[in-house]
Image (tube, rainbow, N blue to C red):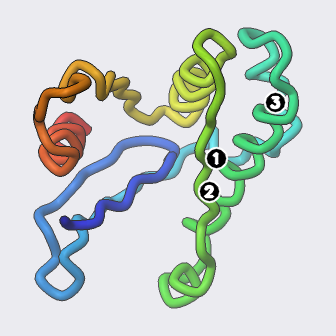
Amino acid sequence: MPIYKFSYHCRGVSVSEKNTDSEIPQISLLLDDSCSLVPPQIVEELDKYIIGQDEAKRAVSIALRNRWRRLRVADDMQEEITPKNIIMMGPTGVGKTEISRRLAKLAKAPFVKVEASKFTEVGYVGRDVESIIRDLVEVA
């Protein structure tokens, strides 16, 4: 199964076909002024829409800022700086999707929500994860 790289970014995204060397689709990113926000400003913006979840808002704001900073260093240095990814877990209704949606809007990034249960139901073999990810890459 191929690996796909996804990241939050500041403005615009283009996904090319798989690179024959790495088999990973290349994603080109464009930066704008929203990339100058620091984590407290990002949290402040999220606070306008999301009540509670302070730890999650801090974590995603730091991760977003670090990705923006990583994009501003030389290409050879970018490979040395590994971005930290976040998995948000919790019961329904605690704000995982809304934090992601608002963060994507702040970063001027596309946001796509996919309910995996619609593709693969219990006891039924539905679409495989690889085809779901391919569809997401095409939409982005």
Q: Is residue 51 above or below residue 122?
A: above
State the residue at coordinates (14%, 69%): 18
Mark 1 or mark 2, which is nearer the start of the sequence?
Answer: 1
Q: Residues within 10 Å of mark 3 (few under 14, many from 20)?
A: many
Q: Position of residue 120 (x, y in %)?
A: 20, 29
Query: Which numbered disc, 2 or 1, marks the residue closer to the eye?
Result: 2
From the viewer's perspective, tell me whether residue 137 is left or right of residue 50: left
From the viewer's perspective, tell me whether residue 80 is left or right of residue 36: left
Residue pointed to by mark 1: 35
Q: Position of residue 31 (x, y in %)?
A: 51, 51
Count of numbered marks:
3
Mark 3 or mark 2, which is nearer the start of the sequence?
Answer: 3
Residues 47 and 11: in front is: 47
* Amino acid type, callout 2: Trp
Helix, strand, or loop for circle 2? helix
From the viewer's perspective, tell me whether residue 72 is left or right of residue 62: left
Q: Residues within 10 Å of mark 2 (few under 14, many from 20)?
A: many
* Amino acid type, callout 1: Cys
State the residue at coordinates (36%, 43%): 12
Helix, strand, or loop for circle 3? helix
State the residue at coordinates (69%, 59%): 66
Pointer 2 with pointer 1, Cβ within 8 A: yes
Residue pointed to by mark 2: 68
The quarter of the picture where residue 49 lies is top right
How far is the residue under mark 3 from the one under mark 1? 14 Å
Pointer 3 with pointer 1, Cβ within 8 A: no
Q: Is residue 89 above or below residue 25?
A: above
Residue pointed to by mark 3: 43
State the residue at coordinates (22%, 54%): 15
How far is the residue under mark 2 from the one under mark 3? 15 Å
